[in-house]
Each structure stands twice: as C-alpha cells, then as structure tokens.
Amino acid sequence: MSGAKAFVKALEGEDVDVIFGIPGGSIMSIYDELLNTGIRHILARHEQSAAHMADGYARASGRVGVCMATSGPGATNMATGVATAYMDSTPMVAITGQVPTYMMARDAFQEIDSTGIYTHITKYSFQPLRPSEVPWTVKAAFYLASTGRTSPIHIDMPKDVQTGEEEIPFPDSVTIRGYRRYVPPDPAAVAKAVDLLLESNRPIILAGGGVIKGGAYDLLLRFAESMNIPVATTLMGKGAIPENHPLALGPVGMHGTVQANKLINETDLILAIGVRFSDRTTMEVSGFAVDAKIVHFDVDPTEIGKNVTAYHGVIGDLRTSLKLMIDILHERTRRGKWGSWLKRVKELREEWHDKIVGVKSKFSPPHMLKIMRELLPPDSIVTTEVGQNQMWAELYFKVLKPRTFITSGGLGTMGFGFPAAIGAKAARPDVPVVDIAGDGSFLMTMNSLATSVEEGLPVIVVILNNSSLGMVAQWQRLFYNRRYSAVLFSSIPDFVKLAESFGAEGVRVYTLDEFKRAFTESLKDDVTTVIDVPIHPEEDVYPFVGPGKTLKDILLSAEGAGV
Amino acid sequence: MSGEKRSIMYSLLVENKPGVLFRVASQFRRRHFNIESIAVGITERKDTSRMTVMMYGDEQMADDFARILRRTVDVLSVDRLRPEDTVKRELALVKIEREGIELLSELFDDGRAQVLYEGDNLVVQLVGEPEDVDELVERLDEEKVLEEVVRTGVVAICRR
Ligand SMILES: Cc1ncc(C[n+]2csc(CCOP(=O)(O)OP(=O)(O)O)c2C)c(N)n1
C-alpha cells in the first residue's frame, strides 16, 4: 500500500468527514487518494482561511478540525490559521505536503522547514519518514489533538512517503511515552477548594474557554445553580453559561461588562475554571481582584500560577473536578451564606445587564446586536472578526448556548470570522451562522465568498462598516490625540456588488428597520448574504478599560465618564 | 517573579530521537532563560536519553519551569536536582603551552588533572565539580598558558 492511501485510510479511521484545504505539488498523491474516499474536501481560496474553517468546524462541533496545504507557501500561509487555533486551544490536525526526504535541506522548490515553524504553534509536529509510519502518526496526531489541553497538531508529509509502497501496519491505539494526557484531579485538592468556597463570603466563578472545550458547561451550571454563585466569564468562556441566566454576569476584561468587572474586584474568592488569565481579561495584573483568593482549576498544570498567583490550584479534567465538587457539597450540610453578596450582584446586574453605553447614534452596533439576538434561534452560531466588531459582540450579544460563539481570542486574527463561519456551517448545516464583521477584517479573507457559494455553505456576514480600521482608530482618538495614522480607508469597495460578483447576495441598510428586514430575509434564504451596515465612523466601544489600567478604571464614554 | 537566583539543575529523561533537543531548548529560549550547561547522553535504554540542564533562576521560576518541561511532549520525566543530594561532575579538555608543565604538577597534585598528550603543547583533562573546573581553568588562564578549553557540561546524579 502507498503512504498516501494509508494516510487517507487512517483519516477515515478517525471518522474525518471533511477537510478544508488547497492542493499543490507536494500533496497531490494524498489529494488523488481522497477521491477514493467519502471524505468531503472543501476548497478554500487561501490556506489561512482553510485553517480558520477547520477551526470554526472544530469549535462548533467539538470534533477535531482538519486542514491541508501544500509545502512552502501553502504551509506558511496556513501558519496564521494554525497559530490562531493554537492560542485558543482548538483541537485540529493540520497537514502539509513536503518535498521528498532525499531533497530535504537543499532549498528544493517550495521547501520550507515546516516542522521548525509549526513546532512553535502546535502541541506537536510530526514528520513521518516512511510509509509504514503513516497510520501510527495519524492516530497519534488525533490522540494528541483531542486529549488533555486540546490543540492543533501538525503532520508534515514528504512526497516520497506518500508515493512509497510497503507493508503498512494499522495500529488500533497508540501510546506516547512522553505525554501525560490526563491527570485526574486530586480529591484532597478538590475538597480544599470546597472548604475555601464555604469559608468565603463573596464568591464568584470565572469560567473560561476550557469549560466549553472540556464539555463542562452542564456541570458548571448545575454547580453554580446549586450553590447560588454568580458566573462571570472570559471572552473565550462566553457560552459557558446562558448569558440571560440570572447568575450570569457576562465577560470580564478590557471590554467586559460593568457588572462583571466591578464584581471581580469585590469578590473574596474566585473559582477560576478553565481560564488562562489573559492580559485582556485581568488588565493590569497588580490591580486584579486584589481582595480575592484565587482557586484555579485547569487541565494544564502550567497554567496554574502562570499569569496570576493562585491561592490554590486543582489540576485535572474540569468535568471530573466539578463532579467531585458537586458530590462533596452534596454530603455537606453547611451551605454558603452569601445573601448580601447576592443582593449586590442582583442590583448591579439589573442596572447594567441590558444597558447600552457610550454610543453616538441610535443606529449603533449594540442596537443591531440586540436585534440579531431577538431574531436568531438560541442555537444559532455567531462568529466575529477582530476589532470593535468583536468587542461589541462580546459586550452586547448574549450567547445562550456553548459552542455558539466563535472568536479569535488569543491571537486576535483579523479575517478569522468569515472562514470560521463557513467551517461552523459545515459542522452545523442545521443552524444559521452569522459573522459579525468589520470592513477591514472582512477584506482580509472575503475571497472565502467563493468557497461559501461553491460549497453551498451559506452564512450571513454583517459588516459593521466604519470605513476604517475602527479599533485602531478608537485608540488613536483616545490615546494619540486623534492623530489618525493609517486607519482611514479612502478606497471602499461596494460590498453589495462584491458579494453579487461571487454569486452571493448583498444588501445595504441605513436604518434599524431596514436592518431588521434584511436580517430576517437572509435568515429565510439559503444563500450567503453580506449585509453592509454603514455605521457612524467614530462610533467607539464602551465600556472600556484602557491599556495599562486596572479593571476598576471603567470608561463609559470618550468624555471620560466612569463608574 | 523575584527571589534569590541560584543555579538550578534538572535531570530529564527524554525520547532519544531527532527534534527533542530542539523542543526542549525552545522552551528555554522563549523565556529568555540562558542554558548555563547542558549534557545529553543515552541511558541504559536505547530509546531514552538523559539530559542534565543547568540554568539560573529563583525557586518560583524553577517550579514553573519544571511543569513546563513536564508538559513538553517527548519529555518522559523531570527531576529537580537539589545540591544537597546530588553528585555532579564536569570534565574539561584544555590545551596549554608546554611551559605550563611545571605549573601543572604544582597546581594539580591532587589528581584532578591528567596529561593526555605531550607535544609542542599539552592536552590536559580536568575533572571535578563544575566549580573546581572553573577554578582550575581560571588559574591556567591567569598564568597565561591557556590556549583552548572544551567542557562537557555538567552531569549529575541523585545520591539517593
Ligand atoms: C491580522 C491582523 N492585523 C492587524 C491587526 C491589528 N488590528 C486590530 S483591530 C484592527 C482594526 C480592525 O478593523 P475592522 O476589521 O474594520 O474592524 P473594526 O474595529 O472597525 O470593527 C487592527 C488593524 C490584527 N488584529 N490582525
């Protein structure tokens, strides 16, 4: 059997149903073998987008996303997408072609040291050197990608390993000596966390992306409800708890909600679950939750104490930890007594939960996001680009289910949202998928319109169009004396015509009513639709905690109104 | 992170295959940790190598970094070697001018130096605790007879 045949057979063995990619010289044998399988290949128009599609697919479904590119430029193009997935711990297998082993390190045509590059943006990079190693490698890649802290894994496939023929064994399972995938939480450590909780007067849960990745959201909700603990999230944790739940406070951070940012500074105990305390979440760390003990739960032992000092750490699978906590609490008769704390939580939540702050016009993104929430069924998926659009979505779009809010949190990659939406649609063709976009980000990967139309993966793109790199412009308005440097677009494409030229639909709206109508319409149609929404070019995102500031310094407007 | 900085030693068991040293070294590089010494060799098992790595840092760094190394795929185990229960040795080959020969017998009457080659110059083997090797090399340098030094890096083993 050839290595290429063994490769696709191994992929089938992992139940891969879709691959996003672009072919090229050094990966053609695998592409040829794909024709003999039932695996669907979705042709991207740029390898970065192929990786974002696989990422969106994985985040929406909880399965391992697969993307594929040729060697050299294919591998370097795809790297941004893989790095994006790495920063957000998406389970993914990224495949690249490579020049034949006998040509390596001679600067052969389209040769690049892909393993060298990908080692830094994946949990592991494999390069099988014989066809017989291929099935083991594929199995190991999926195993590493989907266990422990989930992550992209890279497989570099030299051309002669694809074409070579030999006897090829297919293992049923793999063991990797140097990999500890799963540390069961220490029951004593969990019990101590429970003690700390019961001793506290003002506890809060901070739920991160790990809760969603680890499938711990049901248990989290049960735990929070049974103990009456308010739940704030990180950006990546949006969806860990329905954001319309009375205990839900929304996200903490630079563009966190007023209630979450305030309460995180008033709490005496943070149960941090599957969070990595990103600097966008904590802001100036010396002023972060100064009165709180932090109890940090994570599957990755290196997270404990990395960015903030944890008073107590519980290393292990989050589901098991939460289950243990629930069990222990079940046996104890003592209950937390935090009545006045809950009163304070309720008070703040009622004041701020639905409030729109800092907008210049009634035709503002927050208004539109509220309309979208009303029109979208709860399990609809929303992706975002990066910039103001993303932060408005973070603040004003209430996520009701896990895996329905997909954003590039760690790397902040412009151009992520649209291809990620297409990937999510491939995973969940049954639900509407919407990309909340900025015009700058959309221009980075809008060529994915071709894929969306060609593959029958219709999504809705809402461009909050300020004819600028809005988030950078906002910072220049606030921190650089309104000196605009390289942020204003003077050549603006006609997004309606652009969409139409790809065979998609385009519509421009100028009022909330028009927006409502267009959005309702696009939900009915099964075609890719771009809704161009020209917004006030100086609309800024608030609440906002400026760079270098602590979460106490919440700005509500450009004039410096605080709370 | 603060605290008193001192020499930290790790003893790692790793897969004996290409790319492992790169993966381990990358973890140091990213954090601007300088590897003061590294020695790699095969163990009693063909598929397993032992790395003895030394860096400077405080306790906090040392603990955090042990966890980072442990998480690195292909690293099988990570042990902190504490000075109080560690035996360590380093070997150096030094080339010195011929005139250094008298100095040698004077300086190194305790067996820490052994002449391996005598010709126009001398090749001498120095063995000892890394600090001893430092000291011997320094002495030779002070006497202006030193031409070249090649050191193995520290190897160490836990006494218990
Ligand atoms: C690939 C990439 N390049 C540059 C940046 C820096 N950056 C962050 S936000 C932003 C502006 C985004 O503009 P747009 O997509 O129009 O969104 P808006 O902020 O206007 O909503 C830029 C340039 C980035 N995050 N990603």
Image: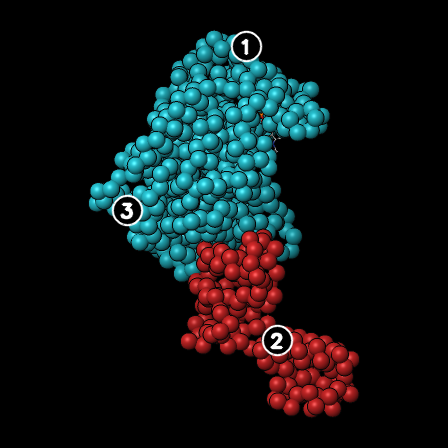
Chain colours: A cyan, B red
* Quadrant of image for the C terminus of chain B: bottom left
- Earlier in the chain: of badge 1 and badge 3, it is 3
Viewer-proximal residue, A163 or A476?
A: A476
Q: Measuring 49% from the left and 69% from the top, which residue is drawn there?
A: B81
Distance in Å between CA atoms under marks 2 and 3? 50 Å
Instruction: Point out which mark residue A510 bears.
Output: 1
Disc 2, SS? helix
Viewer-proximal residue, B155 or A548?
A: A548
Give ligand 1's quarter of the image.
top right
Q: Is residue A479 left or right of residue A407?
A: right
Decide if ligand 1 comes within 8 Å of the CB at mark 2.
no
Which residue in the protein does label 2 denote?
Answer: B131
Q: Chain of mark 2?
A: B
- Residue A498 visible to an observer of this rendering: no
Which residue in the protein does label 3 denote?
Answer: A324
Residue A361 rendering spot, x and y as whole percentages: 55, 13
Amino acid beneath label 1: Tyr
Distance in Å between CA atoms under marks 1 and 3? 53 Å
